[in-house]
Amino acid sequence: MLEDKNKKATSLAELGEFGLIDHLTKYFKVGQETTKKGIGDDCAVISDANETLITTDLLVEGVHFDLSYVPLKHLGYKAVMVNLSDVYAMNAEATQITVSLAVSNRFPLEALEELYTGIQLACDTYKVDLIGGDTTSSTKGILISITALGSAKKEDIVYRDGAKPNDLIVVTGDIGGAYLGLQVLEREKEVFKVNPQSQPDLEAYSYLVERQLKPEARKDVVKLLKDLDIKPTSMIDISDGLSSEIMHICTQSKVGCNIYEDKLPLDPQVISTCEEFEIDSTMVALSGGEDYELLFTISMDDFDKLKGNPNFTVIGHITEENVGKNLITRANQQIKLKAQGWNSFE
Ligand code: ADP
Ligand code: MG
């Protein structure tokens, strides 16, 4: 978790802007057929017969990440994942990214090398091309803005507004882990402040910390759905928490929903850590963000195609709009969902 004080530190001023860009990007190779021109000219050039999808995220030090426990390599990887996840949530293929940076002179070249190692690992693993960006200085801290481009056939794109009453609500993987990972890291940071000699033992929380620091966007799910011949009626990625995302789908589709508490997919480490931290695991599953799983709805006719598949959990169904957005508890009580968890006082 600590920076190695013995590491070489080369000041960014030594390279200059062009030297820096060249140094950071020289090992990136483009592989997408649609990339006609990558880094090096005034613009990148793309040529695609399909629809083009575009999404951007801006990450600010101290607001979106804390470098006291987020290694820069992980930050680079995650910054790419956050964007790819949005592309996959449209049922599209991610193809290219641009990376823009504002960085203060507190960061040596070696820090940016770490960041780009993470970005390159993400690009290689997910087969997306780095095709450009911008580099400038900041008075304080580091800002990273990534734009991702995607490609899909017009008829394959899935929006948030297509859910219909009786559709099944499906979530991939498990949820709540990334939020708990953050709680664990925050706790260790406080311990470290009091006793800098302490070495954190994160063994019992390895899955949670990994979910927080190194999330994986669900490219595999887009392929899996294609192989199963399922086109979701609506889809969204889980960045802000399940509750908030299901509400986006319901609002845009003008429908309601019933989500079943006992169906929420939780990893055993989520359950045990919730017990230790004395927090409600349902609350964590509904409101904890950053899992980057996919939430989608399917027609009931498609249920047999994904039944029993370990990647998917059916957690409820879509209703008429006037039914509202509800959580059905283990005790069979109906509670109104809120963007942040639910209102237990209703
Ligand atoms: P311009 O002055 O035309 O904006 P730059 O000198 O900023 O060009 O960038 C030169 C090339 O390097 C461009 O292709 C640009 O997209 C790319 N580039 C600049 N900064 C980055 C970065 N941080 N990551 C990746 N590519 C970058
Ligand atoms: Mg520029």
Image (cartoon, helix red, strand yellow):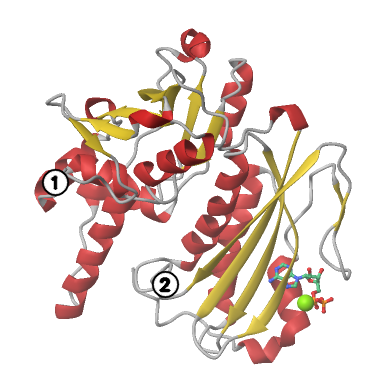
- Earlier sequence position, callout 1 versus callout 2: 2
Q: Position of residue 293 (x, y in %)?
A: 45, 39
Residue type at tag 2: Val
Q: Which residue is painted at 63% across and 62% down in the image?
A: 146
Q: Position of residue 274 (x, y in %)?
A: 16, 46
Q: Is residue 227 left or right of residue 259?
A: right
Q: Which residue is painted at 62% across and 18% down in the image?
A: 227
Q: Which residue is painted at 61% across and 67% down in the image?
A: 145
Q: Quadrant of residue 2?
A: bottom left
Q: Disc 1 marks which residue?
A: 345
Q: Is residue 77 left or right of residue 227?
A: left
Element class at badge 2? loop
Q: Which residue is painted at 54% across and 59% down in the image?
A: 79
Q: Nearer the viewer, mark 1 or mark 2?
A: 1
Q: Disc 2 marks which residue?
A: 63
The answer to whether residue 76 of the structure is visible from this angle is yes
Picture layout, residue 228 above or below residue 123: above
Q: Quadrant of residue 223?
A: top right
The crowding category of the residue bearing disc 2, from other C-alpha atoms within 10 Å (few below 14, some 14 to 19, many at least 20), is: few
Q: Position of residue 73 (x, y in %)?
A: 50, 63
Q: Quadrant of residue 41?
A: bottom right
Q: Position of residue 98 (x, y in %)?
A: 71, 61
